[in-house]
Amino acid sequence: PLTAKVNDQDTLEIGGCSIADLVAQYGSPLYILDEFTLRTACRQYQTALARYYPGEATAIYASKAWNCLAVCALVASEGLGIDVVSGGELYTALKAGFNPQNIYLHGNNKSRSELQFAYDKGCTIIVDNQLELELLSAIASPETPARILLRLTPGIECHTHEYIRTGHIDSKFGFDPNQLPAIFATVAQHPSLQCLGLHAHIGSQIFERQPHQDLGRVLVDWLKEAKTYNLSLEILNIGGGLGICYTESDDPPSIEEWVKAAAQSVASACRAYNLPLPKLICEPGRSLIGSACVTAYTVGSRKEIPDLNRTYVAVDGGMSDNPRPITYQSLYRAVVANHMTTPSQETVTLAGKHCESGDIVIQSAQLPPTQPGDLIVVLGTGAYNYSMASNYNRLARPAAVLVHEGDAQIILERETYEDLLRQDRLPEKLQLKP
Ligand code: LLP
């Protein structure tokens, strides 16, 4: 889906911009976000929802995947809503121009001030637990009740990495379904709480369609149950989770196939119970932005260990700009962006520059021969890279550019040494006298 091509200098271009030119202008490492790919994914969700769901429906962007002003504004311009999980993400979404009506605040331990912030702005709050219900009851008033969804743990297993599975019963998120009848009863009577619907999220990087079909039915069952408490719920949010292709062996369903399966399951369950169709919301993060970005690095040192038949090729970034390999053993693909047509001739361990042996970007990368100064592009770095980046080893976070039809716009400045010291304070007694 990337708007990629190889130019006559044998160099990769994305969004009509040569990787070599981008790195020359903006430095390395560099996140390069392809506007067309991101917009296309937004439209695929909205189009598929309109096609396969007979009621009102929308996608909202799970901005934990990458929350910054430009990404939020771009997604807003496509008419999607947004899922935020902290005061910081909420603040960014508002600054980017999101209408608060399209903002949904998530989280399993929102602070009182985060709840107050979201309530004051008129956002919808996905209530995760009893404490939040109590806090919100105190914050909100009957004149302006808090708009809430209830999050439940649906007890649906899916095959993905243990850390990113959230829908099984042993999860820190959401109400246990056994608690729901009591919660329904409380919420139905509370004048300051306006319960609009239900939410569940079962995990991330999921390649099957069945879990979300099952989830659709489970949620509709609870929608029906809520009716007996005089709650007529109008929103059903099935979370996100559709996986993307990181390596050639990954084979996720398309956005259209995934939406179709989930939407039809919700619609048919409602038909079976003769329930009016709720507004259907899905909350993709990775499948919206993951494939839309690449990270360009510059090749540096090389170390051969002949006895082990091992070659390390080091690049100028690593776990600070992409913590996913060291955190989840995630796999990525890379190309040498300035030798695109040279065939791959060696298997190398693509290493980062951090003082940590586990800082490996790709364990076995098949690459053409490389020299210091060559440009390596790692694909599919749009989701959970910048948003999980750190300053480990006091590396400055890279810049990010948005590319489209030959035009590149900076969306995140590269951090400077001064930026790294911005929060540092030196007590007077520690200041060295010259
Ligand atoms: N909604 C909720 C409530 C979520 O917790 C998440 C992701 C999403 C939506 C979006 O899921 P997606 O469509 O992106 O799969 N850092 C991990 C992924 C953590 C996902 C957390 N929640 C990673 O790098 O793989």
Image (tube, grey):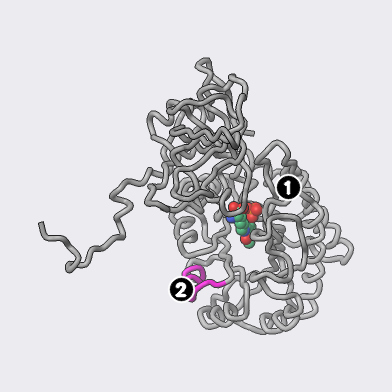
Spot occupied by residue 68 in the image (x, y as percentages of width and height): 47, 50
Spot occupied by residue 42 in the image (x, y as percentages of width and height): 62, 44
Q: Report the residue at 72% width, 83% height from top.
A: 182
User: Is residue 380 shown above or below 145?
Assistant: above
Q: Report the residue at 62% width, 50% height from top.
A: 329
Q: Quadrant of the C terminus?
A: bottom left
Q: What's the mark number on residue 257?
A: none
* Residue span colored magenta: 109-119
Q: In this view, does 157 lie to the left or right of 407?
A: right
Q: Report the residue at 44% width, 49% height from top.
A: 355
Q: Is residue 266 left or right of residue 83?
A: right
Q: In which quarter of the image is the N terminus?
A: top right
Residue carrying label 1: 50
* Residue at disc 2, secondary structure: helix
Residue carrying label 2: 113
Q: Dot 1: few (<14), some (14–19), or many (≥20) neighbours within 10 Å?
A: some
Depth check: 226 or 115 in front?
Answer: 115
Depth check: 336 or 358 in front?
Answer: 358
Q: Quadrant of residue 203?
A: bottom right
